[in-house]
Amino acid sequence: MTRISIIFLMLAGLSAVGLVVLSNWQIPAPTVAINKVISNETLQK
């Protein structure tokens, strides 16, 4: 029973660390502009 509790605590700790890392990660915004031309035939009227 102690092995299950140790594994559970390790998974909970890793999840908590992962959430902290993702919440503090400063992902830069995209800097390249994307221009896509859509023809009038593809749009519904």
Image (cartoon, grey):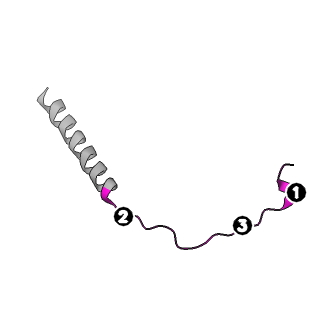
The label on residue 26 is 2
- Amino acid bearing label 2: Gln
* Left or right, residue 25 beside residue 10: right
With respect to residue 1, does 19 lie above or below? below
Q: CA distance from mark 1 to mark 2?
A: 41 Å
Residue 25, x across and y down, in percent: 34, 61
Q: Tell me what residue is drawn at x 11 percent, y 30 percent.
A: 2
Marks 3 and 2, the one that precedes in the sequence: 2
Q: CA distance from mark 3 to mark 2?
A: 28 Å
Residue positioned most to the left = 2
Front-most of residues 13 and 44: 44
Q: Tell me what residue is drawn at x 29 percent, y 56 percent.
A: 21
- Amino acid bearing label 1: Glu
The label on residue 36 is 3
Label 3 CA crowd tier, 10 Å (few <14, some 14–19, many 20+): few
Q: Can you say which quadrant of the picture contains the N terminus?
A: top left
Secondary structure under the numbered disc 2 in the rendered image: loop
With respect to residue 25, does 1 lie above or below? above
Marks 1 and 3, the one that precedes in the sequence: 3
Q: Looking at the magenta stretch, what is its main secondary structure?
A: loop
Question: Which residues are the magenta region?
Answer: 24-45
Q: Tell me what residue is drawn at x 43 percent, y 68 percent.
A: 28
Q: CA distance from mark 1 to mark 3?
A: 15 Å
Secondary structure under the numbered disc 3 in the rendered image: loop
The label on residue 1 is none
Judging by the rendered image, the residue that carries numbered circle 1 is 41
Label 1 CA crowd tier, 10 Å (few <14, some 14–19, many 20+): few
